[in-house]
Image (cartoon, grey):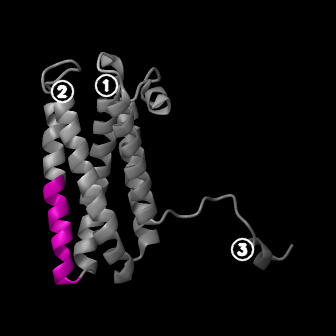
Amino acid sequence: MNTQDKKSGPTDAPAAPDAIALLKADHRAVAKIFDAFENAADGDLEAKGTLARRACEELTVHAIIEEELLYPAAHRALEKQDEIDVDEAYVEHYLVKTLIEKFDSLRPGDDGFDATFKVMSELVKHHVEEEESELFPELRESGIDLVALGVKLAARKNELMKKLDAAGSKLVGDRSLSFIRAA
């Protein structure tokens, strides 16, 4: 067999993720959680609690990979005038993390639980809109290697998700996916 054919033929390895595609997939996943929460019955405290916990987990992992890898790369790659989008993103992350921390003391059914989740979802939706309409196109135009960045983002995300699993945060009995599908 010709070794050149081996190299140019199809492989079983998945294609390296583009950083923007990976982050947009995260955005869509969280949007589904927000929709499921919004569609949950007022009295379905189990669904609301599970969905809020899952949203907080997903948002925390997403914020970490953006802050550790994406935003520093964006600062290096973008022109000075475009860096303001990155600076705004850091501030928006701070606000979302502040709301996530509130869930440490809130339980489904508590006064403020639904309102806190709604404000968090609105803030995240605003953040996603700005990233996808401003920051991501700027990054595409900058010439940054989005595949190499995507590989780093995917590896770090995988590492963080394994830590969540090991901590028992995403238990086998977690029904968040069933609540999302039902929405």
Quadrant of res 69: bottom left
The residue lying at 13 percent from left, 27 percent from top is 112
The residue lying at 17 percent from left, 44 percent from top is 97
Examine the structure image and report whether residue 120 is included in the region drawn in magenta. Answer: no
Which residue carries the number 3 mark? 7
Q: Position of residue 28 (x, y in %)?
A: 42, 49
**Stretch of the chain drawn in magenta:** 79-92
Which residue carries the number 1 mark? 48
Question: Is residue 6 or residue 119 the one in the foreground?
Answer: 119
Closer to viewer: mark 3 or mark 2: 2
Q: Earlier in the sequence, mark 1 or mark 3?
A: 3
CB atoms of marks 3 and 2 within 8 Å:
no
The residue lying at 38 percent from left, 31 percent from top is 166
Query: On screen, 124 above or below 178?
Result: below
Q: Which secondary structure class fits the magenta region best? A: helix
Examine the structure image and report whether residue 87 is included in the region drawn in magenta. Answer: yes
CB atoms of marks 1 and 2 within 8 Å:
yes
Q: Position of residue 152 (x, y in %)?
A: 40, 61
Question: Is residue 131 or residue 155 the one in the foreground?
Answer: 131
- The secondary element bearing badge 1 is classed as helix
Q: Is residue 132 left or right of residue 94?
A: right
The residue lying at 42 percent from left, 28 percent from top is 176
Q: Position of residue 159 (x, y in %)?
A: 39, 47
The residue at the far right in this view is: 1
